[in-house]
Image (tube, rainbow, N blue to C red):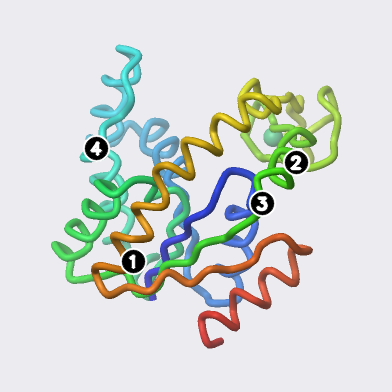
Amino acid sequence: MIIVLLGPPGAGKGTQADLLSAKLGIPKIATGDVLRAALRDGTKRGLEAKAYMDRGDLVPDSVILGILQDVMTSPAAKEGAILDGAVRTVPQAEGLGKMLKEIGKKVDRVLLFDVDDEELVKRLSTRTVCEGCQTPYMGRDPGAKCEKCGGKLVRRKDDEPEAVRNRLEVYRRQTAPVIDWYDDNKMKVLKIDADAPVDAVTKRTLKALGK
Ligand SMILES: [Zn+2]
């Protein structure tokens, strides 16, 4: 089963993706992670992406989709995958659909983790991230140590309240059409109320998936 996750920054998509991955026995494929891995390993697509980044440009969707295709055709993703961060815009939804079709697969479920803006601002302003391995933490102060790698936790500039409001506005503007696009393509987006403790959200998600 291939599951696409949608949701605003701070809704806990990454955490839920990890938990769902364990419950469903299919890997979580986070776009940021696979891009970093391709850069690190210096794959053909990774080098392509690096050329854009070195020029200060965004890596185009076509290159990201190529990296995702490499991962989706690997044995690990034989039974499916949970895609986190693959779709934020309509062109990305279209691109993902085409790319999967080329390899004889398709999106089976789309999940939307929804949380109120005010709650998200609150959550993100207490978030810190490891400088080294990028693991996010909630409710830990900047300067604390990362559990995974011992790196220093920092607050990202884009987690400041003003920046968060901006990101949420961009998110709402981009995501509403994505939901419509999936609807038009006969794919019902399953909306999960994610304003609840992590375990409760996982339960709701599994229920929505019929598991
Ligand atoms: Zn770390």
The residue at the point 69 percent across, 32 percent down is: 129
- Amino acid on which disc 1 is placed: Pro
Q: Where is residue 141, by image quadrant?
A: top right
Give the number of the disc on residue 75: 1
Could you say which is closer to the camera, residue 25 or residue 175?
175
Q: Which of the two marks, 4 or 1, is nearer to us in this view?
A: 4
Name the quadrant where ligand 1 sits.
Answer: top right
- Amino acid on which disc 4 is placed: Val
Say whether marks 1 and 2 touch (CB < 8 Å).
Answer: no
Residue picked out by circle 4: 63
Residue picked out by circle 2: 137
Question: Quick one: SS at disc 4?
Answer: helix
- Is residue 122 left or right of 171 when viewed as pictured? right
- Is residue 211 left or right of 116 when viewed as pictured? left
Report the Cα–Cα distance between label 2 and label 4: 30 Å
Going from the N terminus, do you reach mark 2 or mark 4 first?
4
- Amino acid on which disc 3 is placed: Asp
- Amino acid on which disc 2 is placed: Tyr
Q: Residue furthest bottom?
A: 210
Give the vertical position of 45 relative to 184 (above or below): above
The residue at the point 69 percent across, 25 percent down is: 160
Report the Cα–Cα distance between label 2 and label 3: 20 Å
- Is residue 160 left or right of 114 when viewed as pictured? right
Q: Which of the two marks, 2 or 3, is nearer to us in this view?
A: 3
Going from the N terminus, do you reach mark 1 or mark 2 first?
1
